[in-house]
Image: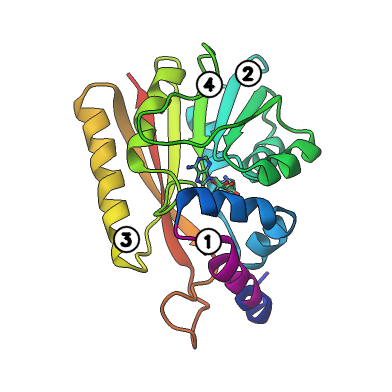
Amino acid sequence: MPLDLEKAKLAWNQIYGGMLESETEKGIVKNYSKHAAAYDQCLQDIGYNIPTTVAELVMKYGNLGSNSQVLDVGVGTGLLGEELNKLGFSGKLDGIDGSEGMLNVAKNKGIYRDLIQQFLTPGCTLDVGDVKYDAIACVGTFSSSHVAPSVAKCFFKHVKTGAPVIISARLFENSTEDSKFLAELRCMFQEICYSGEALLLCEHPTNYYGVNFFTNENDPSKPCPGACFCLAKT
Ligand SMILES: C[S@@+](CC[C@H](N)C(=O)[O-])C[C@H]1O[C@@H](n2cnc3c(N)ncnc32)[C@H](O)[C@@H]1O
Protein backbone atom coordinates (compact mmCIF):
# COMPACT_ATOMS: atom_id res chain seq x y z
CA MET A 1 0.00 0.00 0.00
CA PRO A 2 1.42 3.44 -0.89
CA LEU A 3 2.37 5.59 2.09
CA ASP A 4 0.28 8.59 3.09
CA LEU A 5 2.76 11.41 2.44
CA GLU A 6 1.10 13.84 4.86
CA LYS A 7 1.29 11.35 7.69
CA ALA A 8 4.83 10.46 6.64
CA LYS A 9 5.90 14.12 6.77
CA LEU A 10 4.49 14.52 10.31
CA ALA A 11 6.25 11.37 11.47
CA TRP A 12 9.49 12.43 9.75
CA ASN A 13 9.40 15.77 11.57
CA GLN A 14 8.82 14.02 14.87
CA ILE A 15 11.81 11.75 14.27
CA TYR A 16 14.28 14.23 12.78
CA GLY A 17 12.96 17.26 14.68
CA GLY A 18 12.47 15.61 18.10
CA MET A 19 13.88 12.16 18.68
CA LEU A 20 17.19 12.81 16.97
CA GLU A 21 17.59 16.41 18.09
CA SER A 22 20.48 16.45 20.56
CA GLU A 23 24.12 17.47 20.66
CA THR A 24 25.25 14.36 22.53
CA GLU A 25 24.84 10.57 22.12
CA LYS A 26 23.46 10.29 25.66
CA GLY A 27 20.95 13.06 24.88
CA ILE A 28 19.74 11.08 21.84
CA VAL A 29 19.16 8.00 23.95
CA LYS A 30 17.16 10.10 26.45
CA ASN A 31 15.09 11.49 23.59
CA TYR A 32 14.32 7.96 22.42
CA SER A 33 12.95 7.25 25.90
CA LYS A 34 10.76 10.34 25.75
CA HIS A 35 9.33 9.36 22.35
CA ALA A 36 9.25 5.58 22.90
CA ALA A 37 5.44 5.32 23.03
CA ALA A 38 5.13 7.03 19.61
CA TYR A 39 8.11 5.28 17.99
CA ASP A 40 6.43 2.30 16.31
CA GLN A 41 3.66 4.39 14.72
CA CYS A 42 6.12 7.04 13.46
CA LEU A 43 8.39 4.43 11.92
CA GLN A 44 5.46 2.65 10.32
CA ASP A 45 4.26 5.95 8.84
CA ILE A 46 7.58 6.52 7.05
CA GLY A 47 7.75 2.94 5.77
CA TYR A 48 10.67 1.78 7.93
CA ASN A 49 11.61 -1.44 6.22
CA ILE A 50 14.95 -2.47 7.66
CA PRO A 51 13.73 -4.74 10.52
CA THR A 52 11.90 -6.89 7.93
CA THR A 53 14.99 -7.23 5.74
CA VAL A 54 17.33 -7.93 8.67
CA ALA A 55 14.93 -10.57 10.05
CA GLU A 56 14.95 -12.33 6.65
CA LEU A 57 18.76 -12.25 6.57
CA VAL A 58 19.06 -13.55 10.16
CA MET A 59 16.82 -16.48 9.19
CA LYS A 60 18.78 -17.02 5.96
CA TYR A 61 22.31 -16.98 7.38
CA GLY A 62 21.68 -18.23 10.94
CA ASN A 63 21.47 -21.88 11.85
CA LEU A 64 18.52 -21.30 14.14
CA GLY A 65 16.65 -24.09 15.89
CA SER A 66 14.58 -23.84 19.07
CA ASN A 67 17.73 -23.84 21.24
CA SER A 68 19.37 -21.02 19.34
CA GLN A 69 20.11 -17.66 20.93
CA VAL A 70 20.04 -14.39 19.01
CA LEU A 71 21.07 -10.95 20.24
CA ASP A 72 19.45 -7.74 18.98
CA VAL A 73 21.83 -4.81 19.64
CA GLY A 74 20.03 -1.46 19.76
CA VAL A 75 16.80 -3.41 20.18
CA GLY A 76 14.68 -0.28 20.63
CA THR A 77 11.00 -1.24 20.90
CA GLY A 78 11.63 -4.75 19.55
CA LEU A 79 10.59 -4.40 15.90
CA LEU A 80 13.15 -7.01 14.82
CA GLY A 81 11.74 -9.52 17.32
CA GLU A 82 8.27 -9.02 15.88
CA GLU A 83 9.56 -9.64 12.36
CA LEU A 84 11.52 -12.73 13.43
CA ASN A 85 8.38 -14.13 15.06
CA LYS A 86 6.43 -13.61 11.83
CA LEU A 87 9.08 -15.71 10.06
CA GLY A 88 8.73 -18.57 12.57
CA PHE A 89 11.83 -17.94 14.71
CA SER A 90 11.56 -20.32 17.67
CA GLY A 91 14.79 -19.64 19.59
CA LYS A 92 15.62 -17.24 22.43
CA LEU A 93 16.01 -13.56 21.76
CA ASP A 94 17.90 -11.05 23.93
CA GLY A 95 18.22 -7.30 23.40
CA ILE A 96 20.53 -4.48 24.46
CA ASP A 97 19.76 -0.78 24.32
CA GLY A 98 20.78 2.39 26.15
CA SER A 99 17.22 3.70 26.42
CA GLU A 100 15.08 2.58 29.33
CA GLY A 101 11.90 3.88 27.69
CA MET A 102 12.48 1.92 24.46
CA LEU A 103 13.34 -1.22 26.46
CA ASN A 104 10.07 -0.90 28.41
CA VAL A 105 8.06 -0.88 25.18
CA ALA A 106 10.00 -3.95 23.97
CA LYS A 107 9.42 -5.70 27.32
CA ASN A 108 5.65 -5.20 27.08
CA LYS A 109 5.63 -7.09 23.77
CA GLY A 110 6.75 -10.24 25.62
CA ILE A 111 9.02 -11.41 22.80
CA TYR A 112 12.47 -11.08 24.39
CA ARG A 113 14.07 -13.29 27.07
CA ASP A 114 16.52 -10.73 28.47
CA LEU A 115 16.51 -6.99 27.84
CA ILE A 116 19.67 -5.30 29.03
CA GLN A 117 20.17 -1.58 29.46
CA GLN A 118 23.67 -0.63 28.31
CA PHE A 119 25.03 2.52 26.70
CA LEU A 120 27.51 1.34 24.05
CA THR A 121 30.78 3.18 23.56
CA PRO A 122 34.02 2.36 21.67
CA GLY A 123 36.03 -0.27 23.55
CA CYS A 124 33.04 -1.66 25.46
CA THR A 125 32.12 -5.32 25.73
CA LEU A 126 28.48 -6.34 25.67
CA ASP A 127 26.88 -7.02 29.09
CA VAL A 128 25.76 -10.52 28.14
CA GLY A 129 28.10 -12.61 30.29
CA ASP A 130 29.64 -15.56 28.48
CA VAL A 131 26.71 -16.37 26.19
CA LYS A 132 27.86 -17.21 22.65
CA TYR A 133 25.06 -16.25 20.28
CA ASP A 134 23.98 -18.01 17.08
CA ALA A 135 23.46 -14.61 15.46
CA ILE A 136 23.75 -10.93 16.33
CA ALA A 137 21.71 -8.30 14.53
CA CYS A 138 21.83 -4.55 14.81
CA VAL A 139 19.09 -2.56 13.10
CA GLY A 140 19.03 1.21 12.65
CA THR A 141 21.58 1.75 15.40
CA PHE A 142 24.82 2.38 13.53
CA SER A 143 24.42 5.97 12.41
CA SER A 144 26.02 9.30 13.18
CA SER A 145 25.34 10.37 16.80
CA HIS A 146 24.23 6.81 17.73
CA VAL A 147 26.66 3.89 18.08
CA ALA A 148 30.25 4.41 16.85
CA PRO A 149 31.52 2.09 14.06
CA SER A 150 34.26 0.57 16.25
CA VAL A 151 31.63 -0.89 18.61
CA ALA A 152 30.99 -3.51 15.88
CA LYS A 153 34.35 -5.11 16.73
CA CYS A 154 33.13 -6.41 20.07
CA PHE A 155 30.15 -8.25 18.55
CA PHE A 156 32.49 -10.99 17.30
CA LYS A 157 33.49 -11.90 20.88
CA HIS A 158 29.88 -12.86 21.55
CA VAL A 159 29.01 -15.13 18.60
CA LYS A 160 29.85 -18.73 17.78
CA THR A 161 32.24 -19.51 14.92
CA GLY A 162 30.32 -19.36 11.64
CA ALA A 163 27.51 -17.30 13.16
CA PRO A 164 26.26 -14.23 11.27
CA VAL A 165 26.52 -10.63 12.44
CA ILE A 166 24.10 -8.48 10.47
CA ILE A 167 24.28 -4.71 10.64
CA SER A 168 22.11 -2.22 8.80
CA ALA A 169 23.12 1.23 7.62
CA ARG A 170 21.40 4.11 5.87
CA LEU A 171 23.15 4.70 2.54
CA PHE A 172 21.64 8.09 1.89
CA GLU A 173 24.13 10.69 3.06
CA ASN A 174 22.36 13.79 4.28
CA SER A 175 25.36 15.58 5.80
CA THR A 176 29.14 15.50 6.03
CA GLU A 177 28.77 13.60 9.31
CA ASP A 178 26.65 10.96 7.55
CA SER A 179 29.28 10.53 4.80
CA LYS A 180 32.10 10.34 7.33
CA PHE A 181 30.17 7.83 9.41
CA LEU A 182 29.43 5.54 6.46
CA ALA A 183 33.08 5.64 5.32
CA GLU A 184 34.21 4.77 8.86
CA LEU A 185 31.69 1.94 9.11
CA ARG A 186 32.88 0.42 5.82
CA CYS A 187 36.52 0.76 7.00
CA MET A 188 35.62 -0.97 10.25
CA PHE A 189 34.12 -3.94 8.37
CA GLN A 190 37.28 -4.13 6.22
CA GLU A 191 39.49 -4.01 9.30
CA ILE A 192 37.48 -6.79 10.96
CA CYS A 193 37.76 -8.94 7.82
CA TYR A 194 41.49 -8.22 7.26
CA SER A 195 42.17 -9.20 10.88
CA GLY A 196 40.75 -12.63 10.06
CA GLU A 197 37.94 -12.32 12.58
CA ALA A 198 35.11 -12.43 10.05
CA LEU A 199 34.15 -12.78 6.40
CA LEU A 200 31.85 -10.37 4.59
CA LEU A 201 29.07 -12.59 3.22
CA CYS A 202 27.26 -9.82 1.38
CA GLU A 203 26.19 -6.21 1.31
CA HIS A 204 22.47 -6.55 0.78
CA PRO A 205 20.79 -3.45 -0.71
CA THR A 206 17.33 -2.55 0.56
CA ASN A 207 15.01 0.38 1.18
CA TYR A 208 15.63 2.01 4.54
CA TYR A 209 12.55 4.22 4.60
CA GLY A 210 9.74 4.20 2.05
CA VAL A 211 10.03 8.00 1.73
CA ASN A 212 12.90 10.46 1.64
CA PHE A 213 12.34 13.99 2.90
CA PHE A 214 16.09 14.66 3.13
CA THR A 215 16.53 15.90 -0.42
CA ASN A 216 13.48 17.09 -2.16
CA GLU A 217 10.48 18.19 -0.10
CA ASN A 218 8.40 18.26 -3.29
CA ASP A 219 9.07 14.67 -4.22
CA PRO A 220 9.67 12.62 -1.09
CA SER A 221 8.01 9.56 -2.56
CA LYS A 222 11.26 7.83 -3.58
CA PRO A 223 12.60 5.45 -0.93
CA CYS A 224 15.65 6.28 1.14
CA PRO A 225 18.28 3.63 0.37
CA GLY A 226 19.98 1.38 2.88
CA ALA A 227 22.02 -1.79 3.10
CA CYS A 228 22.55 -4.71 5.44
CA PHE A 229 26.14 -5.83 5.92
CA CYS A 230 26.21 -9.56 6.59
CA LEU A 231 29.40 -10.90 8.17
CA ALA A 232 30.20 -14.31 9.61
CA LYS A 233 32.65 -15.01 12.41
CA THR A 234 35.57 -17.13 11.22
C1 LIG B 1 16.63 4.02 15.30
S1 LIG B 1 16.50 3.19 16.83
C2 LIG B 1 16.49 1.51 16.24
C3 LIG B 1 15.74 0.61 17.18
C4 LIG B 1 15.37 -0.76 16.60
N1 LIG B 1 16.54 -1.55 16.33
C5 LIG B 1 14.56 -0.58 15.35
O1 LIG B 1 15.05 -0.92 14.26
O2 LIG B 1 13.45 -0.07 15.45
C6 LIG B 1 18.12 3.32 17.53
C7 LIG B 1 18.22 2.68 18.92
O3 LIG B 1 19.59 2.72 19.31
C8 LIG B 1 19.67 3.08 20.68
N2 LIG B 1 20.98 3.71 20.88
C9 LIG B 1 21.47 4.80 20.26
N3 LIG B 1 22.72 5.07 20.67
C10 LIG B 1 23.02 4.10 21.59
C11 LIG B 1 24.17 3.82 22.38
N4 LIG B 1 25.28 4.57 22.28
N5 LIG B 1 24.14 2.75 23.20
C12 LIG B 1 23.04 1.97 23.28
N6 LIG B 1 21.92 2.19 22.57
C13 LIG B 1 21.91 3.24 21.73
C14 LIG B 1 18.50 4.02 20.90
O4 LIG B 1 18.13 4.07 22.26
C15 LIG B 1 17.43 3.41 19.99
O5 LIG B 1 16.61 2.51 20.69
Circles 4, 2 touching at the beta carbon (< 8 Å)? yes
Q: Main secondary structure of the magenta part?
A: helix
Residue 218: x percent and y percent?
Answer: 49, 88
Give the image location of residue 14, x and y in percent: 62, 69
Q: Nearer the viewer, mark 3 or mark 2?
A: 3
> Residue at the location (45% across, 55% down)?
206
194 vs 213: above or below: above
- The answer to whether the residue labelled 3 contacts the one labelled 2, judged by CB atoms less than 8 Å apart, is no
Q: Quadrant of residue 55?
A: top right
Marks 1 and 3 sit apart, C-alpha to C-alpha, by: 14 Å
Q: CA distance from mark 4 to mark 2?
A: 7 Å
Amino acid type for the residue under numbered disc 1? Leu
Q: Earlier in the sequence, mark 1 or mark 3?
A: 1
User: SS at mark 4?
Assistant: loop
* Residue to which mark 2 is pinned: 65
Near-viewer residue (39 or 57): 39
Return the residue at label 4: 63
Marks 3 and 2, how far apart at CA: 40 Å
Identify the amino acid type marked 4.
Asn
In the rendered image, residue 136, in percent from the top left (x then y), is placed at: 50, 29
Kind of residue sitting beneath label 2: Gly
- Write the residue at 51% across / 35% down: 137
Query: Residue 20 — which label?
Result: 1
Q: Amino acid at mark 3?
A: Glu
Mark pair 4, 1: CA separation: 35 Å
- Sequence-first disc among 4 and 3: 4
What is the C-alpha distance between the residues marked 4 and 3? 36 Å
Q: Are marks 4 and 1 in contact (CB under 8 Å)?
A: no
Query: What secondary structure is found at the residue carrying circle 3?
Result: helix
Element carrying mark 2:
loop
